[in-house]
Structure formats: structure tokens, C-alpha cells
């Protein structure tokens, strides 16, 4: 198991890295996944880049530096990638029983929502509800990730919360479910919190 996978598995159980102000460097768990994850006073940079070079870009004692624009911009230039976003990282455990709403699985791999998800995740499955979709797939370092999409006409009625909660019923027993949410998308943040997800950190992925 890759070092990042072990760290995320532990964090999913509530066993977080020590809040020691350290920046930890690891290689990429696979060619796709590259980025920065910040927990409380402990940051992990996973990139196939010279570690001494990266450490030289970070001022000592500056806990915010790994997710600040100067460092991320330097990583973009060095890797030939771009930062997709700086997201809030949330996690929740699985729930037993059926989802709280009717869902129909989309089996068409050419469906636009499925194709889009496959650019960032493996083992993708997508379910459609009246007014939205929920998808699950293996994302960063193999962790299970959930994402939801709501039709504009159905926004603001609690459907996002139900779909996010449905993801917890759809994931396998013993699997922590992760979600990446843009902090400025307050409606989505509220929906995931209401569905029982808890904030565990922040994340910036560098995508090809």
C-alpha cells in the first residue's frame, strides 16, 4: 500500500497526522494523482518532483505555504500540470440499508457524466435520481470518492443532501467515503455536512 493510501485510510478512521507543523513529501501513488493535502498543521505533498527543490520553496514555519499560489504555481510549471481547485476535503463512513430515495444505475459508459468522471476516477458507478445524479469511484490513492450533480431546477430543495447521503449507503461496508467540495459552493458544503460528512482538510490536485 502506498504511503498516501495508508495516511488517508487512517485519517478516514479519525487517526490524523500529528499537528506538528511538518510538510511531508511522498511520490505519486500513480501517474494520475499529484497534489497537496493539508490536515491540521500537517501537510502532505505527493508529486514525483525533487523533494529538496520543493522544500526550498516553503518558508519555515509557514503552515499555509503549501496551498498558497506561489508554491502551487511552481509545481504547475515543474510538472506541466494545472491546479484544478483548492477544495475542502470531507469524509464519512458507510451506512447500512437502502438509499433514502429511488435510484437507477446508469450503465452506458458513453454517458457524458460517466465519461467526465472516468477522467479522474477508476471503477466509476453512476446512479440517476429524479433531478440529479450521484457517482462513486476510486480517486486519489485509491480512496472511494462521491460526487453529486443537481439539475438547476431542483437546487435548494434538499436533493443534494439526499444524494450525498445515498452515496454512504452505496459504498461498501468498511469503506470511508471522501468528497471534495469547493469552499465557495456553500450550498454543496451545507448539503454534505447535513448528510453526515465531516471536514478533515483541504486539497489541491494538479491535473494533466
Image (spheres, rainbow, N blue to C red):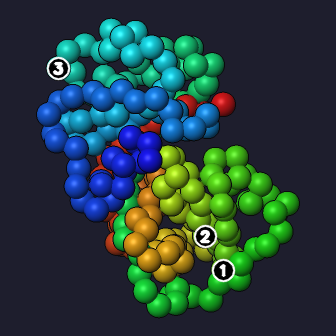
Residue at position x 65%, y 84% in the image: 103
- Residue at 63% across, 52% down: 121
Residue on which disc 2 sits: 134
The residue carrying pointer 3 sits among few (fewer than 14), some (14 to 19) or many (20 or more) residues within 10 Å by Cα, namely few
Instruction: Please rate how many residues cluster around mark 2, counting C-alpha atoms within 10 Å: few if below 14, some from 14 to 19, many from 20.
Output: many
Going from the N terminus, do you reach mark 1 or mark 2 first? 1
Residue 60: quadrant of the picture: top left
Q: In the rendering, at what x and y percent does residue 57 appear?
A: 35, 11
Q: Quick check: 158 above or below 150?
A: below
Secondary structure beneath label 2 = strand
Circles 1 and 3, Cβ within 8 Å, touching? The answer is: no
- Residue 97 against residue 127 in the figure, above or below: below
> CA separation, marks 1 and 3?
47 Å
Residue situated furthest front in the rendering: 1
Number of labelled discs? Answer: 3
Quote the CA–CA distance across marks 1 and 2: 8 Å
Residue visible at 30% across and 34% down?
Answer: 43
Kindly indicate the quadrant of the structure image that contains residue 151. Answer: bottom right
Q: Are marks 1 and 2 in contact (CB under 8 Å)?
A: yes
Q: Identify the element where label 3 is drawn.
A: loop
User: Relative to residue 104, is residue 81 depicted above or below?
Assistant: above
Q: Earlier in the sequence, mark 1 or mark 3?
A: 3
Which residue does the numbered mark 1 point to in the structure image? 129
Which residue is more in the foreground, 1 or 150? 1
Front-most of residues 172 and 150: 172
Q: Which residue is mark 3?
A: 61
* Circle 1 residues within 10 Å: few <14, some 14–19, many ≥20: some
Amino acid at each position: 500500500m502506498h504511503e498516501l493510501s495508508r495516511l488517508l485510510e487512517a485519517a478516514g478512521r479519525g487517526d490524523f497526522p500529528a499537528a506538528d507543523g511538518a510538510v511531508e513529501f511522498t511520490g505519486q501513488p500513480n501517474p494520475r494523482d499529484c497534489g497537496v493535502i493539508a490536515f491540521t498543521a500537517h501537510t502532505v505533498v505527493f508529486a514525483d518532483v525533487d523533494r529538496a527543490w520543493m522544500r526550498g520553496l516553503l518558508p519555515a514555519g509557514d503552515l499555509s505555504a503549501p496551498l498558497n499560489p506561489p508554491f502551487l504555481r511552481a509545481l504547475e510549471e515543474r510538472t506541466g500540470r494545472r491546479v484544478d481547485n483548492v477544495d475542502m476535503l470531507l469524509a464519512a463512513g458507510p451506512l447500512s440499508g437502502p438509499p433514502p430515495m429511488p435510484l437507477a444505475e446508469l450503465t452506458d459508459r458513453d454517458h457524458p457524466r460517466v465519461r467526465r468522471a472516468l477522467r479522474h476516477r477508476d471503477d466509476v458507478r453512476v446512479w440517476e435520481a429524479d433531478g440529479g445524479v450521484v457517482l462513486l469511484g476510486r480517486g486519489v490513492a485509491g480512496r472511494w470518492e462521491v460526487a453529486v450533480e443537481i439539475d438547476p431546477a431542483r437546487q435548494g430543495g434538499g436533493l443534494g443532501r439526499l444524494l450525498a447521503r445515498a452515496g454512504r449507503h452505496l459504498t461498501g461496508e468498511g469503506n470511508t467515503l471522501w468528497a471534495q467540495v469547493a469552499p465557495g459552493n456553500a450550498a454543496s458544503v451545507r448539503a454534505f455536512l447535513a448528510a453526515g460528512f465531516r471536514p478533515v482538510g483541504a486539497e489541491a490536485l494538479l491535473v494533466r
